[in-house]
Amino acid sequence: TDLDRFVSGLPKAELHLHIEGSLEPELMFALATRNGITLPYADVEALRAAYDFSNLQDFLDIYYQGAGVLQTEADFRDLALAYFDRAAADHVTHAEIFFDPQTHTDRGLPFSVAIEGLLAGMAEAEARHGITSKLILCFLRHLSEAEAFKTLEQAEPWLDRIAGVGLDSSEIGHPPEKFARVFAAAAAKGLKLVAHAGEEGPPAYVHEALDILRIDRLDHGNRALEDAVLTTRLAREGMTLTVCPLSNLKLCVVPEMAGHPIERMLGAGLRATINSDDPAYFGGYVNDNYRAIAANGVLTKADFATLARNSFLGSFLDDEAVTKQI
Ligand code: HPA
Ligand code: ZN
């Protein structure tokens, strides 16, 4: 449709993308072969068929297993390049990508392997497509505070190439407050702060992310809408929400795409953005997410232009770079 063409062609930033979640089944099998690893699936079709999730944890179990094929810097570089090629095709001009170092160090890889490979892929993507990018280190919230501190320490040699820290993995039972001290330490090092909150967890977790972690940007935030005072506050403070429609559908955070909360978020004056989260697992890249919302027939071209503009306003680009993009 005309609206599909319009939303697809908008220059946009992607602010919520787990690079390990961009590992397509084809690349997973290729890397398994390259590294002499046997996957517990007969082929790409059998693997894709397993991507049928009832909740966040169902997905995480299969996502951490899939990441096991990533063994060398070249693997991480190839992973990143595959994502940026795909993102560039969707008119993404800037991406702020998450990586989960603990997923890799816990299986014996040195911290350097993932980050050096990703940085190489980011540099090559900028040369190839002109796409700029930043890296956000996520702590796995199902692991301990001590393990998060150890990860932050391991990152020390690369701090000038890391834009910020985030918080992901199993939300319920692992409130933001658990990471208060490690986030304070990251802030003291000059890092930006983001956290997943209000995806499955209650509005109270969004409050903690704001008041205890002092985040610069909120990942998901859907359940903030259950709290009118919180919603008003997020709007007043100009907080950016990185919303992920296809992820929400696949993880049963929403029952259907119709009436997706992003429509109410824009109505409430929230600075919402559209993102793909884990595109290889959730059925689409950023433009698929824009088109899925467009298909609801509620938001207008002006709304989608706002969403794309929000993605640059909510990015960690400096003001001059933002002005050039919007
Ligand atoms: N939520 C929490 N953890 C994650 C996600 C998500 O959507 N994707 C990858 N890790
Ligand atoms: Zn996420």
Image (cartoon, rainbow, N blue to C red):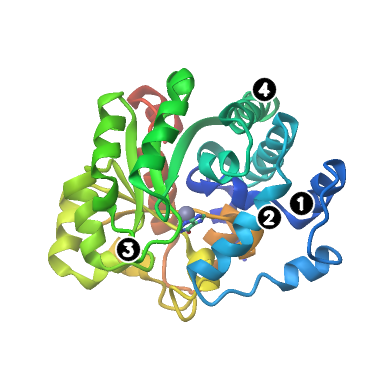
Mark before the other along the chain sequence, 2 or 1: 1
- Residue in view at x 60 percent, y 52 percent: 21
Decide which of 162, 321 is in the foreground and name it.
Answer: 162
- CA gap between label 3 and label 4 equals 37 Å
The image's mark for residue 116 is none
Q: In which image quadrant can residue 191 be found?
A: top left
Q: Which residue has dot 4 on it?
A: 127
- Are the residues flagged by discs 3 and 1 in contact, CB closer than 8 Å? no
Q: Is residue 207 left or right of residue 183?
A: left
CB of mark 4 near ligand 2 (< 8 Å): no
- Are the residues flagged by discs 2 and 1 in contact, CB closer than 8 Å? yes
Mark before the other along the chain sequence, 3 or 1: 1
Nearer the observer: mark 4 or 2; the answer is 2
User: Three-letter amino acid code at disc 3?
Assistant: Gly
- CA gap between label 3 and label 1 equals 30 Å
- Kindly state the secondary structure of the residue where label 1 is placed: helix
Percent across and percent down for residue 242 are: 40, 52
Q: Which residue has dot 3 on it?
A: 198
Crowding near the residue tagged with mark 2, few <14, some 14–19, many ≥20 C-alpha atoms within 10 Å: many
Quadrant where the image shows the C terminus: top left
Vertically, is 219 above or below 113?
Answer: below
Q: Which residue has dot 1 on it?
A: 28
- Residue in view at x 35 percent, y 66 percent: 172
User: Three-letter amino acid code at disc 4?
Assistant: Ala
Percent across and percent down for residue 96 are: 48, 38
- CA gap between label 4 and label 2 equals 29 Å
Q: Which residue has dot 2 on it?
A: 66
